[in-house]
Image: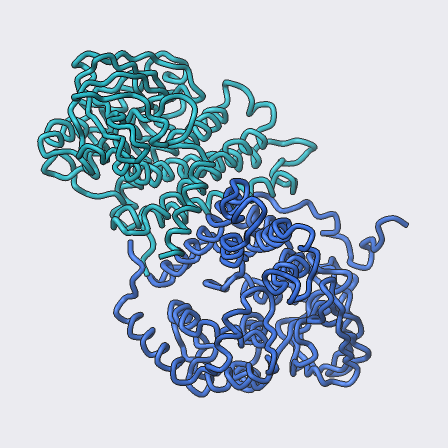
Amino acid sequence: MNFDFSDDQKQLRDQARKFLAEKCPPKAVRVVLDGKEPYDRALWKGFAEMGFLGVAIPEEYGGAGAGHLELCVIAEEVGRALAPVPFSSTVYLAAEALMLAGSDAQKQAWLPKIASGEAIGTLALFEGTGNPSPKAIKLEATNGVLNGTKKPVADGAIADLIIVAARTASTGRDSDISLFLVDAKSGGVEAKALTNLDPTRGQAELTFANCKAEPLGAPGEGWSIITQVLDRAAVLTAFEQVGGSDRALEMGRDYALDRIAFGRPIGSFQAVKHMLADMYVSATLARSNAYYGAWALSTNAPELPEAAASARISATQAFQHCGKNNIQVHGGMGFTWEFDCHMYYRRANALALGLGSLSYWEDQLIDRMRKRNAA
Amino acid sequence: MNFDDTPQEAAFRETARAWVAANAPKELEEELASSSLGRIRLKHADIVEVGKAWQKKKADGGWACLHWPKDYGGRGATPIERVIWQQEEGVYGKLTQPFQIGEGMCGPTVMAYGSEEHKRRYLPKLASGEEIWCQLFSEPAGGSDVAGLRTRAEKRGDDWVINGQKIWTSGAHYSDYGLLITRTDPNVPKHKGLTMFFLDMKSPGVEIRPIKQANGMQEFNEVYFTDVVIPDSQRLGAVGDGWNVSLTTLMNERMSIGARLATGFPEMFEFCANLMTDDGLAIDDRATRSKLASWAVKASGLKYTSYRAISALSKGDRPGPENSIGKLVAGVMLQDIATYAMDLEGAAGVLTGADETVTQGQFQQMLLTSPSMRIAGGTDEILRNIIAERVLGLPGDIRVDKDVPFNKVPTKGRS
């Protein structure tokens, strides 16, 4: 059994960690947090140069053709550093959708631009309150023309390429939904940035008014593709969450070692130690579930839907747990803008919602387990 | 990343599988497979008796304590081969319950501190199950605080005379030998005055009384010592070094990788998928699904955590500290699952008779037994301390009794 990343993959992780430690310290994250920039352009360029953006994109489309395990180790470091760049929307959502469903021409048009950092991409799925569901999609596509509104759309205000889930029929079946590809520069789509829990990653409302779009994948296949994209993104996001959990745990641990109260390091009090031990437990469970998701993703195993849901739930729980308890260990200082704790708390809670909430994925997991047991 | 055996591992697995297929007591398979929660009780056989037969057969075939050196009754197997063996032994591994303390704790301690003569005399018979060992550590005055123990050993000529009481000794009534930690010097701080011995459990002055537990069962014992004589040759480690010796024992307790920890999840999933409530199947209820999902990812998280440790062994590396979370997660889960299973049964959940309940009373039994899972082998709180101190590097507790002679440490809270 070799249920671990290879030495090369671990080396890539170390490389990414070193790069991010240098180029993305907390003060760089704060530039975006404070609203001075919509994202860190220099860092994004660095990601392209390091080959992070195209690591899982085949060489024929301008990528490195390495694979998803390599992408997982990078995602972990992105999460650890809270990198304020549109990485997840571009790489986990847009690029994955293109690779799954795009025509050769569409892949040729967009994947090299994603790999080189020229194009930011996203998936426009949600339309207000609610979780992923074909029923929730009202935006209509008629003869390749889109009308309707999407929100929230991750990085929607800075995206060049928008993959849109649209209604093409009203039979009540999943096949009512089709996917479309929109070039944001081609007109017909208006973006409005929205304030959100985690300003280090933007959210937007996109309004499509007679917007011309080209189909992505076969008509009526939209929901099936979205489900697959969400599963893949769930695994990759789980690695961001695992990286963030580990960092939040470390921050809490370090503070508990340094902070003296009642004449002793607060880390010597069992109430604090046990809180940190429980964070370690959550983070460990999340990492192990994420590894299983990585295996399923990289081998495109039939277990992927269940593995993805497990990875998603476990990582969401862990990052939320570590994020909030890191603040608790810090006490009052943890609630200041100046300390970085709130940035992890914000990211943890934003990531918990982006692909559908915890309760949605819990539901999915149980459905998928039942399906397996029935088979 | 893959779950495959290396060619050598596959060959070893093949050999082990063939041997199990040819030798295992298949008549017990079904009963062993179904008793997945808590301790094993066989209807028509005595676990010690059938366990001994299986263990002896394994020893003769070279499959007992296989990670031990051949000279001491083992096979000289690698850690990963031991894991593969456990996987292939499967449900029959449950028959090894009477020998687990000997194999996991007493044996390694004798191996580390016994004389060559001791090792050759005692380890092969321990491995083959012909002689069963128990561990005499916990006392009424020292459970989590093991070093607070009071059982006295006093030197008399070449012998030691033991007086005191141990508690929570699994299998004392069928054990042949015991690993015993005692206080030899109460005038020094508590960790410094301890000494380790082993003794014949049939020695005059040893009295074993079963404990009636909170769940109504009797699996543990109190062991009383009245002027029990142990020759100095049965001392393990130096006089006063018992604490360090005991750390070897306890480390081994927590090292067992790939141990089959029951979480109750598979049973609970099955239960919820079949239980019809007034609002339909339990598994269709949103609140129930949410709980099931949280338990599911804990169970899978534990499984894949152990896979990570196995992978490290397979590469010849030392596993990381991740495995320390196992019992902490599983113990709480068992209790929570049992509580919720009964909640779903409603008022009838209160009944415990096998005929009265949906699942032959297994969740009721689990409820009553689960508190012990959070205590035995290190309480949840001790395990959290271990994670915090050894894994995260946080400081140890400030111990007020650290530099105080043991006989000056207070023994009562409110007086």
Q: How is the image coloured?
A: by chain
Q: Using the image as rendered, state which of residue B404 and residue A347 is in the foreground.
A: A347
Q: Position of residue B165 (x, y in %)?
A: 78, 70
Determine the image quadrant of residue B5: bottom left
Residue at image location 15% in from the left, 27% down from the top:
A110
Q: Position of residue B60 (x, y in %)?
A: 45, 88
Q: Which chain is cyan?
A: A
Q: Using the image as rendered, state which of residue B181 and residue B140 is in the foreground.
A: B140
Residue at image location 56% in from the left, 44% down from the top:
B279
Determine the image quadrant of residue A183: top left
User: In this figure, what is the number of numbered marks?
Assistant: 0
Q: Using the image as rendered, state which of residue B317 and residue B359 is in the foreground.
A: B359
Q: Residue furthest right?
A: B415
Q: Which chain is blue?
A: B
Q: Is residue B324 visible?
A: no
Q: Is residue A61 visible?
A: yes
Q: Using the image as rendered, state which of residue B244 and residue A311 is in the foreground.
A: A311
Residue at image location 30% in from the left, 35% down from the top:
A174
Please determine whether, in this image, residue B223 is positioned above or below residue B53.
above
For residue A374, side relative to residue A173 (left or right): right
For residue A217, side relative to residue B391 (left or right): left
For residue A55, side relative to residue B338 (left or right): left
Q: Position of residue A331 (x, y in %)?
A: 60, 27
